[in-house]
Every structure is written in structure tokens, then in C-alpha cells.
Image (cartoon, rainbow, N blue to C red):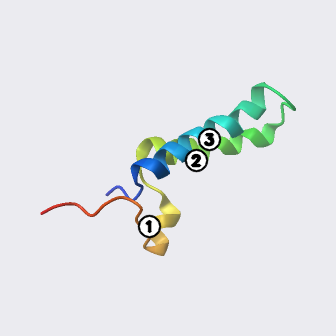
Amino acid sequence: MQRNEGTIDRALRIIAGLGILSLVFVGPQTPWGWIGLVPLVTGLVGVCPVYSVLGIRTCPAPRN
């Protein structure tokens, strides 16, 4: 698959994912924190399935 997330988008997703995931281990210790895996994985991989469906790209166009 082709990447559709830019650098800033990926960094924000990783930070948000780690923050949400920390709710499982610290703080209220709620199982809802596992939802943080979604932005974490999409940030690490660089591909967002929702962006693909909607045709959104936040990364620069590849040079030919």
C-alpha cells in the first residue's frame, strides 16, 4: 500500500496513540485505552484506511 500520511500527521498519531494507550496502565486503568492501538499502528505504518476510502493524503506527492 502507498503511504497517505505525512510526517506531522504520523507523529501526532503516534503521540496520541501512546497517550490513549497509557490509560490502560496508568490513571483510570480503563480497557477503553486499547483503542489507542489504532492511531499508534496507523502512525507507525503510515497508512490510514479511512484516508484511503475518502481519498485524503497528508503526505507530499511522490516525485517522478
Q: Is residue 30 above or below residue 13?
A: above
The first of marks 3 and 2 along the sequence is 3
Q: Is residue 29 above or below residue 64?
A: above
Q: Residues within 10 Å of mark 3 (few under 14, many from 20)?
A: many
The first of marks 3 and 1 along the sequence is 3
The residue shown at (55%, 46%) is 13
Numbered tag placed on residue 39 in the rendering: 2
The three-letter code of the residue at mark 1 reads Ser
Seen from this angle, which residue lies furthest right? 28
Numbered tag placed on residue 5 in the rendering: none
The first of marks 1 and 2 along the sequence is 2
Q: Under tag 2, what secondary structure? A: helix
Q: Quadrant of the N terminus?
A: bottom left
Q: Is residue 5 left or right of residue 24?
A: left
Q: CA distance from mark 1 to mark 2?
A: 15 Å
The residue shown at (58%, 47%) is 39
Numbered tag placed on residue 52 in the rendering: 1
Residue 23: x, y in percent?
A: 77, 34
Q: Is residue 40 left or right of residue 1?
A: right
* Residue receiving disc 3: 17
The three-letter code of the residue at mark 3 reads Gly
Q: Quadrant of the C terminus?
A: bottom left
Q: CA distance from mark 3 to mark 1?
A: 20 Å
Do the numbered discs 3 and 2 sit on residues whose CB atoms are within 8 Å? yes
Nearer the observer: mark 3 or 1; the answer is 3
